[in-house]
Amino acid sequence: MKIVAVLYPGGQAAKEQSAMLGCVENELGLREWLESKGHTYVVTDDKEPSDSELDKHLPDTDILITTPFHPAYMNGERLEKAKKLKLAITAGVGSDHYDLEHIHKHKPDLSVLEVTGSNVVSVAEHVLMSILVLIKNFVPAHAQITNGEWNVANVAMRTYDLEDKVVGTVGAGRIGFRVLQRLLPFQCKELVYFDYQSLAPEREKEVGAKRVESFDEFLSKCDIITINCPLYERTRGLFNEQALSKMKKGAYLVNTARGAIVDRDALVKAVNSGHIAGYAGDVWYPQPAPKDHPWRYMPNNGMTPHYSGTSLDAQKRYALGTKEILEAFFNDKPFRPEDVIVRAGAIASASYGEKK
């Protein structure tokens, strides 16, 4: 079999510096392991669809390994090129870079898996950091120091405490729930969540959180909102101009889920007007983000490259998970059910299915 991995954004320097490539290949000895079994293992790039090594390999690729951090966007056209593709693995969490609907309709032999849970702690911690960076006005305060300045009043005038604030998460799954757990010691005024289903009563009690069934009511209640839901058809552009306008004036928004959940230009307008006091996170669309992406230059932003889910601890977990998926596939053994996004063309994950 031919296994193709897209683990870096392209170029020799990226090959040498990529922590993900080093973790998957070196720590696990993935290349040696696959080649010892008689498989062909190729690491390639996906700089531009019109000039991509990946496209040259797709027609004879049996297994494709990608990451959410430098995603290879597998649209319908590309999927049709991959006539032999039987297994697609996301080395991490989040498989929205695959056109899952196209797979469902046209690729009955293809299964898509990811390493569910591998980076939930890493992302939840990043969410907390992002919230604090925003409300403590950390970025301009730190810039003062690196610029040789000292103006306490200038940065303190936009600084708040997390205590006594209403904080809400869109999505209370593996990451959203851990965010609520980590918010509990801050003695927020109220913790709320918006999701298509309720947490179990004992889980709600554990974090002291309440579900808000109306999205508009949720938006208007929160001082701080963090997005922790998957990207699929109904969440794409969820935070559009209308939704942003219904948030409290001066509220903060954190997004470590997917960039396309937030309307790019509507957000810029809301932040520039001051209606949204600040925006932080590490997800963009597309990725890597182009140099002219306006989120780079918004006031009061705490944006970073997409690294929240790729701490060294998380890398080890999703690299091990990738190898476990491959072992199950080669030995015709069942996959972990929670890892399966699409099984033989059918969408198996509730996270990407139709929600009421």
Image (cartoon, grey):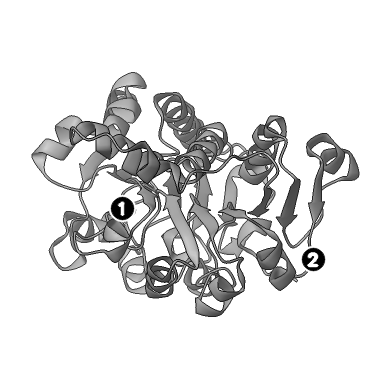
Query: Residue 79: x and y, percent?
Result: 37, 66
Task: Return the disc, 1 or 2, that comes first in the chain's sequence.
Answer: 1
Q: Element type at marker 2?
A: loop
Amino acid of disc 2: Glu
Residue 61 - label: 1
The residue positioned 34% from the left and 45% from the top of the image is: 304
Query: Residue 108: x and y, percent?
Result: 53, 66
When the figure is inspected, residue 115 is found, relative to residue 195, above or below; the finding is above
In the displayed orientation, state which residue is furthest to the right: 201
The quadrant where residue 319 appears:
top left
Measured Cα–Cα span from mark 1 to mark 2 = 44 Å
Query: Residue 53: x and y, percent?
Result: 16, 55
When the figure is inspected, residue 314 is found, relative to residue 203, above or below; the finding is above
**Residue 347 or residue 181, whichever sits in front:** 181
> Which residue corresponds to mark 2?
213
Left or right: 296, with 343 as reference point? left
Residue 197 - label: none
The residue positioned 18% from the left and 62% from the top of the image is: 48
When the figure is inspected, residue 235 is found, relative to residue 211, above or below; the finding is below
When the figure is inspected, residue 343 is found, relative to residue 181, above or below; the finding is below
